């Protein structure tokens, strides 16, 4: 539009005295997008795949990260329920895996299977919110020997509640821990990390 004089027209129309626009940075972005140095395929595993706008901000963030690194980011949307029924073969050929946030139990076991596949095959993995929770559940189940470890969101009375609301945290004797901003107890994430490792 600049080449067609739109910016000059708008400035004249509204009597704006503006200096010549410096578009060097924008032109560099356009150049980088048109001339990538490589490409990666990232599998995004979730349960709202049929509504990709649910993940719009994550998809755009991945694309912008690719632009800055001169890499084309191909995003393969994979339904976590398909992983449950069809297996981890759906994940083959991915350079990285991302599990975004979500809620509810539907598709969670497919996400756990995905986290395990990433760990066992040394594939870079990013879990956002629920995505990190399922990675913790997977690690607890398959590495730390905590069979059927789960989140209290999905199984309130599970033997190994590795993910729980702060109001549900218990000490070794089974007493509910009282935590607040004024408490001298460690931050919930620090406590969780030390109890699993």
Image (cartoon, rainbow, N blue to C red):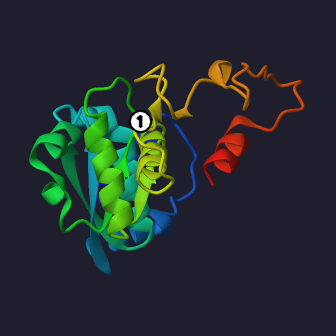
Left or right, 32 with reference to 175: left
Q: Which residue is mark 1?
A: 101
The residue lying furthest to the front in this view is 173
Left or right, 176 with reference to 90: right
User: Compared to 176, does 79 lie above or below?
Assistant: below
How far across and how far down the image is residue 171, in percent? 73, 29
Q: Quadrant of the C terminus?
A: bottom right
Nearer the observer, 161 or 130: 161
User: Compared to 7, does 48 lie above or below?
Assistant: above
Q: Quadrant of residue 2?
A: bottom left
Query: Local crowd at mark 1 within 10 Å, few (<14), some, or many (≥20)?
Result: some
Q: Quadrant of residue 123?
A: bottom left
User: Compared to 109, does 139 lie above or below?
Assistant: below
Instruction: Residue at 32%, 81% (x, y): give it.
Output: 37
For the residue labelled by badge 1, is the local secondary structure a helix, a strand or a loop?
A: loop
How far across and how far down the image is residue 73, in percent? 29, 63
Instruction: Residue at 44%, 48% (x, y): give it.
Output: 135
The residue lying furthest to the left in this view is 86
| Residue 2 shows up from this direction | no
| Residue 141 shows up from this direction | yes
How many numbered tags mark residues here?
1
Left or right, 102 with reference to 53: right
How far across and how far down the image is residue 42, in percent? 29, 60
Left or right, 185 with reference to 169: right
Instruction: Residue at 29%, 68% (x, y): give it.
Output: 95
Nearer the observer, 42 or 141: 141
Instruction: Residue at 49%, 46% (x, y): give it.
Output: 136
Nearer the observer, 76 or 10: 76
């Amino acid at each position: 539009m600049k080449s067609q004089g739109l910016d000059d027209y708008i400035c004249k129309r509204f009597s704006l005295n503006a200096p010549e626009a410096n578009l060097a940075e924008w032109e560099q972005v356009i150049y980088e997008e048109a001339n990538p140095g490589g490409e990666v395929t990232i599998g995004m595993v979730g349960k709202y795949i049929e509504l990709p706008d649910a993940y719009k901000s994550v998809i755009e963030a991945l694309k912008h990260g690719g632009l800055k690194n001169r890499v084309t980011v191909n995003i393969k949307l994979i339904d976590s329920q398909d992983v449950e029924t069809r297996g981890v073969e759906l994940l083959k050929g991915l350079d990285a895996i991302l599990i975004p946030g979500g809620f509810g139990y539907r598709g969670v076991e497919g996400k756990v299977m995905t986290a395990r596949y990433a760990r066992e095959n040394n594939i870079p993995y990013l879990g956002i919110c629920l995505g990190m929770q399922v990675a913790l559940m997977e690690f607890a189940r398959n590495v730390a020997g905590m069979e059927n470890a789960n989140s209290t969101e999905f199984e309130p009375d599970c033997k190994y509640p590795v993910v729980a609301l702060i109001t549900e945290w218990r000490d070794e004797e089974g007493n509910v821990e009282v935590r607040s901003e004024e408490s001298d107890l460690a931050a919930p994430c620090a406590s969780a990390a030390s109890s699993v490792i």
